[in-house]
Amino acid sequence: MKKIIKIIGVALLMTAFTQNSTAQFKFNAGLEVGLALEDSYGMMYGASIGGEYGIGDDNMGITAQVGYILAPVDLPSDYINVSSSFLPIQLGYKYYFDTNEGGAYLHGQLGVHMFMTSYDFEYETFDRFDPVTFEIIYKTEKESYSDSSTNLSYALGGGYLINENIDLGLRYNIVTGTGGNFSYLGVRAAYNF
């Protein structure tokens, strides 16, 4: 899978640098909001930075984006100190219907999502039997758990470039995994520098 991502990345860069048009690079930063399509996750939020290298006749671009998104998880009440987040790193291709200075566009992305999860949970276990009161005494135990994984991801979406600086985008992300796919809708409001 890593070889496929490397091949696609090299192909995108070769395409970008072999164009004879006036290419330009734009740096951007944005705020992210996501809605997971699985029941256990709540509303997600975060931030991202990226860049776009314009190619073609001002209506195409190669993109790169990295972000940090918090993904709250709904777990039973005995779970405490829950922390769930992911780091999406994606390369993409944008096609502008007009020009890269304004208007609607389509955007496809391919990359990885690095998931990070940690939580503590409490439970009661048998401690002893009190022979005087004939009661069972329990003690509270605590355990911690953390895990991380890196999974292939891809996204399809579009957006609207209000002017050269303000970019509003919507995408449908699918993150592949051994236990099944994770998908979410993402909205990004970005500022191009």
Image: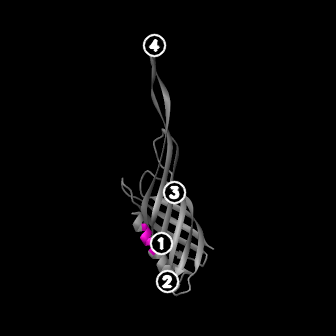
* Structural distance between the alpha carbons of marks 4 and 2: 85 Å
**Few, some or many residues within 10 Å of mark 1 (<14, 14–19, 20+):** many
Residue on which the image places disc 2: 18
* Structural distance between the alpha carbons of marks 4 and 1: 69 Å
Q: Main secondary structure of the magenta part?
A: helix
Residue on which the image places disc 4: 131
Front-most of residues 159 and 86: 86
Provide residue 156's location: percent of width, then percent of height: 43, 70
* Image quadrant in which you'd find residue 68: bottom right
* Structural distance between the alpha carbons of marks 4 and 3: 52 Å
* Residue 95 visible from this viewpoint: no
Q: Nearer the viewer, mark 1 or mark 3?
A: 1
* Structural distance between the alpha carbons of marks 2 and 1: 17 Å
Q: Secondary structure at mark 1?
A: strand
* Residue 65 visible from this viewpoint: yes
- Mark 2 or 1, nearer chain start: 2
Residue type indicated by callout 2:
Thr
Residue type indicated by callout 3:
Met
Provide residue 84's location: percent of width, then percent of height: 50, 51
- Mark 3 or 2, nearer chain start: 2
Residue 7 among those drawn in magenta: yes
Q: Secondary structure at mark 4?
A: loop
Q: Secondary structure at mark 3?
A: strand
Residue on which the image places disc 1: 92
* Structural distance between the alpha carbons of marks 1 and 3: 22 Å
